[in-house]
Each structure stands twice: as C-alpha cells, then as structure tokens.
Image (cartoon, rainbow, N blue to C red):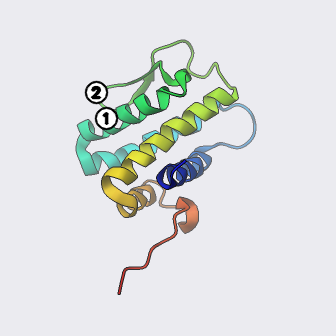
Amino acid sequence: MNDITASARSLARRLITLESPSEDGSEPAFGPALRAVEKLRRPLTRLSGTAGYRSLVMRALALSSAYTPWLTPLRIEPDGSIQWAGEALYSDTSDGAEEGGLALVSELVALLITFIGEGITLQLVRSAWPDASPGITGFEEKEAPR
C-alpha cells in the first residue's frame, strides 16, 4: 500500500469513527460511512459544485466497488445523494458492509488528496467536522519552508 492510500485509509477510518453511534447495535454497519460521505458533501459542493462532488463520489464508488462488490447497488443521484438500488440497504451487518464503507470513504479521501492536496483536504475535513479534535485527521501538520 502506498503512502497516500495508507493516509487516506487512516483518515477515512477516523471520519467513520466520528460518525459511528454508540455500541448499542441498532446502527447498520454501513451507516457511518454513508454519513461521513454525506457530511463531506457540503464543503465539497462549495469547492467544486454539485457536478464536481457527484463526479468525485461516483469515481470513489467505481474504484471501491472493484474490490468490494457489496457496493455495486449504490447509485449517486443527480443531486449527489447516495441511494441503494438493491435490497434493503442495511441487511448486511457483516464485516463486508464495514469494509465496503471504509473502501468508499478511503477512495474519496484519496481522490481529494490527489486532486487538491493534503492541506485543502484537511481544511475540508475540518469544516465538515468543526467540533472534532485537531488530531482527527491523522496527518502531521507540515511547517512551511523558511
């Protein structure tokens, strides 16, 4: 795994954790990942418009579906919302659902890092999760060269 993938996966895991409910077992396994993607929707739409956000999420879905077929029934609507085209969205509470969610968020974060860089990606994350601790991103802040 290259550095950008490891960084993206680490950040994705943290974002999903922020969206995870208490351990009461009533939450479907894939729910926190969908909420994380949805929470990024506002800052990404401000940055790139609805079409840009939709394109990024569609690409992240295509990349993650390649190795997590469980995601294949997800559809990205014209407004950028995510819909399930298969049977009940939350019927799978197995590790496959959690791993699929992590794959989707990881790919989205990796695309952001690739296209806009770590710094702007972190700004977007902080704007989506303003109450999160400063270390939530998992990236070390780099000092500007002197």
> Label 2 neighbourhood size at 10 Å, few (<14), some (14-19), many (20+)?
few
**Which residue is found at the position 50% from the left and 13% from the top?**
86
Could you tell me the amino acid type at mark 1?
Arg
Vertical order, 115 against 120 (above or below): above
**SS state under label 2:** loop
Q: Nearer the viewer, mark 2 or mark 1?
A: 1
Marks 2 and 1 close (CB-CB < 8 Å): yes
Q: Quadrant of the C terminus?
A: bottom left
Q: Tell me which numbered mark, 2 or 1, is placed earlier along the sequence.
A: 1
**Label 1, residues with CA under 10 Å away: few <14, some 14-19, many ≥20:** many
Q: Is residue 75 visible?
A: yes
Q: Is residue 142 above or below residue 100?
A: below
Q: Position of residue 27 (x, y in %)?
A: 66, 32
Q: Could you tell me residue 69's position as x and y percent?
A: 53, 21
Quick check: 50 above or below 8?
Answer: above
Q: Is residue 80 above or below residue 41?
A: above
Residue 63 pos. (x, y %): 43, 32
Q: Which residue is mark 1?
A: 54
97 and 7: which is toward the camera: 7
Residue at 50%, 49% in the rendered image: 5
Q: Quadrant of residue 57?
A: top left
Q: Is residue 84 left or right of residue 16?
A: left
Please indicate whether residue 32 sits to the left or right of residue 45 in the image.
Answer: right
Q: How many marks?
A: 2
Q: Secondary structure at mark 1?
A: helix
Q: Which residue is mark 2?
A: 78
- Tell me where residue 29 appears, x and y as whole percent: 64, 31
